[in-house]
Amino acid sequence: MSGIATVVKNAGSHYMLTELPEWKVFPAVLRGRIRLKGATTTNPVAVGDRVRYEKDGETFVITEVLPRQNYLIRRSTNLSRQNHIIAANIDRAWIIVSLYFPEVKLPLLDRILVTCGCYGIPATVVLSKTDLYRKEDPEGIASLRRIYEGAGYEVIETSTLTGEGIDLIRERCKGAVNLFSGESGVGKSSLIRAIDPSLDPKVGDISLAHLQGKHTTSLYEMYRISSGGYIIDSPGIRGFGLVDLEKEEIAKYFPEMLAASEGCRFTPCTHTHEPGCAVKAALEAGKISPERYNSYLGMLEEDKKFR
């Protein structure tokens, strides 16, 4: 017995598969030679991968990983050269952030967005807990929207308490494989449960001592949504190193900088010190946010560390 299936859960050395669009999940293990092929990544097989499998006695064995449409990958932030594939074959990434508890880290958000752009994954920024922020910090919401809508991204405000934005995301998830990602504590699991109450990813408390969420999801897992479509839930992300991006390429994945760079005097231009740089002119004119430009400079600096 053999076939082609999609990986819907990664539990280390064991996997759960199903032949989408059917949802008949069964366990499988990885053939050793595939592990060797993935020497540059911590996981040669990721949730969302389409794989060929066969039955060996009573065990299903993954024998081949089929070519990926795309994937989201990050480098370990401890200067190691190990990379980790978060998920594969994604139709849209939903990057969930909160203004506080935990406080939004714009450089981390920008690294995820740049990587999505690099690997051809459409991305939407989702602001959670807006029922709380609208009362306490409406300017914080406006500022986040100004930065990211100004850069060309869609920003959706959501609240699991009032239901704001939930129907919109649920509708947009239909017929697609959707990655939900973000820091621990931003409300990702609560959002998934609001989209489909029959799902029950773990929901954790916020660690007030560190103003960060405790990790509540330790495994990568795909869920089928009763209203249609699929959600890949990923563990909370605390660091996100860039992979396979030359420093000259990074600015291409800042949409607002890419548009402005057409007017630069020199090509290539790092947008840091060159005369006649249209990106720096746009920054000074308020057309590019200083927060996004500072994230870009941080990525250039990070690129040097890994060389």
Image (cartoon, rainbow, N blue to C red):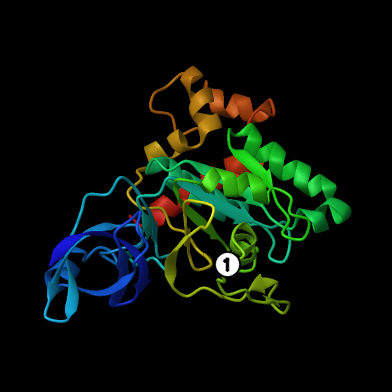
In the displayed structure, 285 sits above or below 28; it is above
Q: Position of residue 219 (x, y in %)?
A: 44, 73
Please report the residue visible at 74 percent of the width from the left and 58 percent of the height from the top.
129
Residue 22, quarter of the rendered image: bottom left
Please state if 243 lies on the left or on the right of 31 as rendered.
Answer: right
Residue 261 image offset from top left, x and y in percent: 49, 24
Disc 1 target residue: 198
Residue 239 seen in this snapshot: yes
Percent x, y of residue 115: 43, 47
Would residue 65 appear left or right of 235 to someone viewing this image? left
Q: Amino acid at mark 1?
A: Ser
How packed mark 1 is, by other alpha carbons closer than 10 Å (few <14, some 14-19, many 20 or more), is few
Above or below: residue 260 compared with residue 130: above
Q: Position of residue 42 (x, y in %)?
A: 30, 69
Name the residue rendered at 38%, 60% in the picture.
75
Q: Which residue is at the front of the view, 15 or 139? A: 15
- Residue at left offset 38%, top offset 58%: 87
Q: Is residue 300 visible?
A: no
Q: Where on the picture, by quarter, is residue 76?
A: bottom left
